[in-house]
Image (cartoon, rainbow, N blue to C red):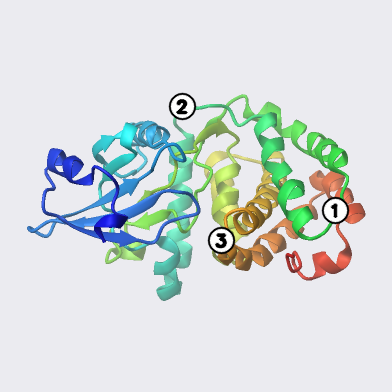
Amino acid sequence: MNDLLPHGLDDFLAEAGWTGAVVEPLVGDASFRRYFRLRAADGSTAMLMDAPPPQEDPRPFLHVAGWLAEHGMRAPRILAARPDQGLVLLEDFGDARMRDWLDDHGGHEQAVYAAAIDALVALHAQPAGPFAPYDMAVYQREAGLFTEWYCPAMGLSVDEDGWRTAWDAVLHPLLPRQTDPVTVLRDYHAENIMLLDPAGPDGGAQGVIDFQDALVGHRAYDLVSLLQDARRDVPVELESAMLDRYCAATGAGDDFRADYARLGAQRNAKIVGIFARLWKRDGKARYLAFIPRVWDALERDLQHPALAPVAAWFAANVPQEIRDTQGGELQ
């Protein structure tokens, strides 16, 4: 076990006041980060993030966590940090992840999602954070993951210039609506929302994790992350009801709904590319099982008139048999 622990951990824990704590490894995510739960003799717990350089840098996480805490979003408190070593000691939010909890408490789904929507409404009422812009260059770079990784994995030779041109046409209309931007967490979904008081009504208060890639951009993006979740089935009726809830609270209209479809298609195309990359480059085949769910949401987004140029590209470049099998079998 000691061989698996981060280098310099004993000194770090001693400085943080956690000498002698039991260190339990936890399941990691799609990055190089690792997580451990610490258990002290008095029963208190904390979370240890190991974000080893040069592959990882915890400074963005610390930066965003501090801003969120100052602006009403429930992020884990930072108990200690050595960024140069990639070590961060965090408040323990427990094990009640929204996705897993709802698997066992499906009757609370409407209320739990409503609380997550209301948290976004509150976040979007705040001034945008001091983060980089979610601009066209970022949108295009992300969408490009589809043609860079998924298409070759499927043995497809596609029109990459036409892909970029189609996305320019689809995304340019939403850019003026980013002139009053909000903080975009980018991975706001049921695996990254923790229920802090699961014994409370409808799962109690919620906290967020995995927000280190936050940018400043469009209000619809995090709604897409939540309601077109790659890792959990969200009924279409629930998606529609929660989108209505957000629009009613913010006064968003038809342009917003069109932008929701635009960013839904962009995000879902990106995720399909990322999951293909995780398999081909990183040997993480388990993410392939999520592609049919993402592909299904992508197809629904493509039906919106705002996606006509991208829908035409798919019709010309991705054979119907692949689309009919919700993304097909990767090679």
In the rendered image, the vertical position of residue 153 relative to residue 8, given as above or below: below
- Quarter of the image where one finds residue 303: bottom right
- Decide which of tag 2 and tag 3 comes sooner along the chain: 2
The residue depicted at 71 percent of the width and 61 percent of the height is 295
Task: Name the image quarter holding the N terminus.
Answer: bottom left
The residue depicted at 54 percent of the width and 40 percent of the height is 250
The amino acid on which the numbered mark 1 sits, given as a three-letter code, is: Phe
- Decide which of tag 1 and tag 2 comes sooner along the chain: 2
In the rendered image, the vertical position of residue 113 relative to residue 141, given as above or below: below
Instruction: Name the front one of labels 2 and 3.
Output: 3
Residue 127, numbered label: 2
- Decide which of tag 3 and tag 1 comes sooner along the chain: 3
The amino acid on which the numbered mark 3 sits, given as a three-letter code, is: Lys
Q: Position of residue 218 (x, y in %)?
A: 60, 35
- Binning the other alpha carbons within 10 Å of mark 2 as few (below 14), some (14 to 19) or many (20 upward) gives few
Circle 1 residue: 314
> How far apart are the two marked residues, 1 and 2, measured between alpha carbons?
37 Å
The residue depicted at 77 percent of the width and 48 percent of the height is 147
Q: Position of residue 47 (x, y in %)?
A: 27, 51
Q: Position of residue 331 (x, y in %)?
A: 74, 65
- Secondary structure type for disc 1: helix
